[in-house]
Image (cartoon, rainbow, N blue to C red):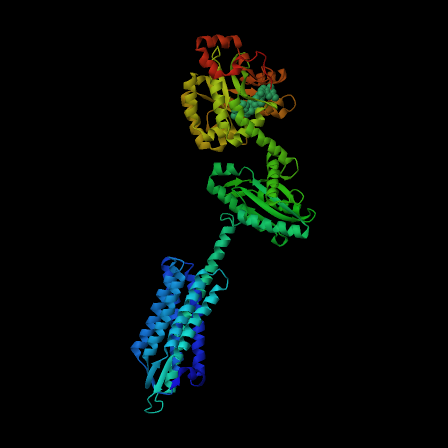
Amino acid sequence: MISVFDCIAYEHNLWLVLLAGLICAAGSWVAAHVYFRATQTIGLQRAGWYFLTALAAGAAIWCTHFVAMLGFESGVPVSFDPVLTILSLVIAVVGSTVGFAVGGMRFSRFAPALGGAFVGLAVAAMHYTGMAAYRVQGIVSWEMSYLVASIILAVLFATLATHVALTSKRRDAVNWSAAALALAILSLHFTGMTAFRVQPLLVEPSVSNPDALLTLALVTTCMAAVIVAAGLVSYILDRSVRAESFERLRKMALSDVLTGLPNRANFNETLKAEIAAARDGGTKLAVIAIDLNRFKAVNDLRGHQTGDEVLRRLGQRIQALLKQEIGEFVARTGGDEFTAICRVNGRASLPDFLMRLEQALFKTIKIDNFEVSPGASFGVAIYPDDASDQTLLINNADLAMYRAKSDPSQIVCYYEAGMDEAVRARRSLAGDLRNALVQGELFLHFQKQSSITTGEIRGYEALLRWEHPRHGLIPPDEFIPIAEEDGLIVEIGEWVLRRACVAAMTWDPALKVAVNISAVQLAQVDLSQFVKRVLQETGLAPERLELELTETTIVKDKERTMHTLRKLREMGVSVALDDFGTGYSSLETLRTFAFDRIKIDRSFVAEIGSEDQSIAMIRAVLALAKALNIPVIAEGIETQEQFDVLKVEGCDEAQGFLLGRPVPLASVATGAAHVVSRMATTGFQDLQRMLGPDSQSSPMPRET
Ligand code: C2E
Ligand code: CA
Ligand code: CA
């Protein structure tokens, strides 16, 4: 009797055995990798990867067996039953497909092991079906202990393979899984062959043709190799496609689509790295916050498409000026905000960088037949002088930028320690302002507006006052911008309008009241509806109300503003153009809407007597207003000379300290006695509630 065990040493064709081992290793490696990939996908893709896994594993299992069998020289003539041989291949592929799929299902934590066991059983089933196809001229018997051991080994190693592939967190888990799978196949085959016994019935010594068997072995190996290679190629292609799309995604995630510049995420990462490098090298670093000037006006006036085009062009200019080799970096970090990083060596290269940025951002942009002069404000903070913490550094650059923005004479501002103090103070003031309304710290003063020729009082302008409990009287120029920034102006503006109307109701004769309207108010509420409601509630005739708007208010959203103004006009409310001459497109504004009155800004009046040009300006405005048939009021008249000049030039109305300072309601017109007498007739409590405490304040004018 010949034991197969002996044959391995003496009668196996060593080359074919090696070939079988090789195909087994390659197939297992590919199967494990493809299987691992399958776990990262879902649905149909996952099913596809499972099938590819099973194909590679099945080919490896079957080919290993078949080639090894061809190399097994039993010393008796052999042949293969074709049906059983093909069936064994089907068992290998289908069995491992099911096994791998079950393993990946994760219905329980034992699923990977269960699937693996199934794969092991499939390997065994394949092997023994294959053995059944192996026809020898001899009596075949099996050593049961080896047979059982071979199945146990296959199941154990295959279980290990799927378990490692599916649950291990190790980076090289997939290689370990491949090794376990190869061991499952090899251990089964060679232990199984040890169980195999043949007692030759020698008719003729070896009728099998060794060359034919060798050819068969090589053809089989080639086929298996093709299958395994196909799996490998799919895996490699998939990996490179994934790597490409990952790279594309990474790039997209790090750059701004519109300008092509790095985005905020990219900026944060870069700054982090630059700070670390500067810390290690003991060098300095500048962070430059950049905010475009008037960009919102471009958007509002010319539409978002033009705005986008401006940003795109600026992005191109910035990219062209960067010297990346010395670490210059600019990212788009917001709508019209950019942030730059520049390595500084004793601030040497910083001025040069800033100059180039300034040139790029200030040069006019021509779009169609229209020109934009963008302009920008720059705020610089230096690491580690101004801050060593990333967030603080950016914050300080922003603070410096705001300073530059608020001061028209400065383009670049360097961070200084006092800046955050100013911002903190502003913030705390914003908080106080919220309380001011509730606490009754806000009140109105009224300033006379009279005819220049007759001196007759035409009306009063309502001017807001804030008596802060700690800081005393705060001028509106200081707190109204804060209220606008905060959105609080909407609430405050409503209060002012209601209160001014209620106050005007107490006047006899029934004079006009002028109320200032902020741009934010116009943008946020349906102003005409609100005005209508207030007029109804207070009973004030619409003809007695005049709203004062500045040009910036109107330019912000022209269409909408014009619509609102027309509605107000229909109601009978009049509209005055305040601060005329300080805007940049005054004539344009005048053409678009027929204002009821123009207010020449007090800065022109203040220069009367000192500069000839201001008189020329006043003359021009008066001529224009005459042509358009709009009355003109001059504000800020402080001296008799100013008054006389305006009278000579033909100005219609006047307002200013010379004629009367802003005073509390109680001191308006006929005085407090009148207010009180009026209250007696119109339901005292109602009016008193509406007027609040300062309706009975002292007759002494409160001065600003
Ligand atoms: P404005 O609308 O141009 O108001 C006229 C300002 O000129 C007032 O300053 C007034 O007190 C001041 N003024 C009047 N006559 C003279 C004068 O002869 N010489 C000088 N140098 N100044 C004079 P005020 O009250 O400090 O208000 C400043 C600005 O605050 C106002 O300018 C207006 O833009 C804003 N404001 C005041 N009250 C309100 C309000 O209720 N709502 C809104 N949105 N803004 C308001
Ligand atoms: Ca005004
Ligand atoms: Ca004004």
Residue found at the far front of this picture: 145
Residue 487 on image: x %, y %: 50, 31
Residue found at the far right of this picture: 346
Would you place residue 5 above or below residue 368 in this image?
Answer: below
Q: Quadrant of residue 219?
A: bottom left
Compared across the picture, whether 484 is left or right of 212 comes to right
Compared across the picture, whether 366 is left or right of 571 comes to right
Task: State whether residue 600 appears in this view.
Answer: no
Task: State whether residue 92 appears in this view.
Answer: yes
Would you place residue 366 above or below residue 601 in this image?
Answer: below
* Residue depicted at x 47% and y 41%: 304
* Residue depicted at x 38% and y 76%: 145
Would you place residue 69 above or below residue 122 in this image?
Answer: below
Tell which of 242 and 17 is nearer to you: 17
Residue found at the far bottom of this picture: 204
Q: Quadrant of residue 74?
A: bottom left
Task: Give the total number of marks visible in the rendering.
Answer: 0
Residue 56 on image: x %, y %: 40, 69
Residue 644 on image: x %, y %: 60, 16
Tell which of 458 and 139 is nearer to you: 139
Tell which of 4 and 103 is nearer to you: 4
Residue 688 on image: x %, y %: 48, 14
Work out which quarter of the rendered image holds the N terminus and state it. Answer: bottom left
Would you place residue 114 above or below residue 357 in this image?
Answer: below
Work out which quarter of the rendered image holds the C terminus and state it. Answer: top right
Tell which of 24 and 552 is nearer to you: 24
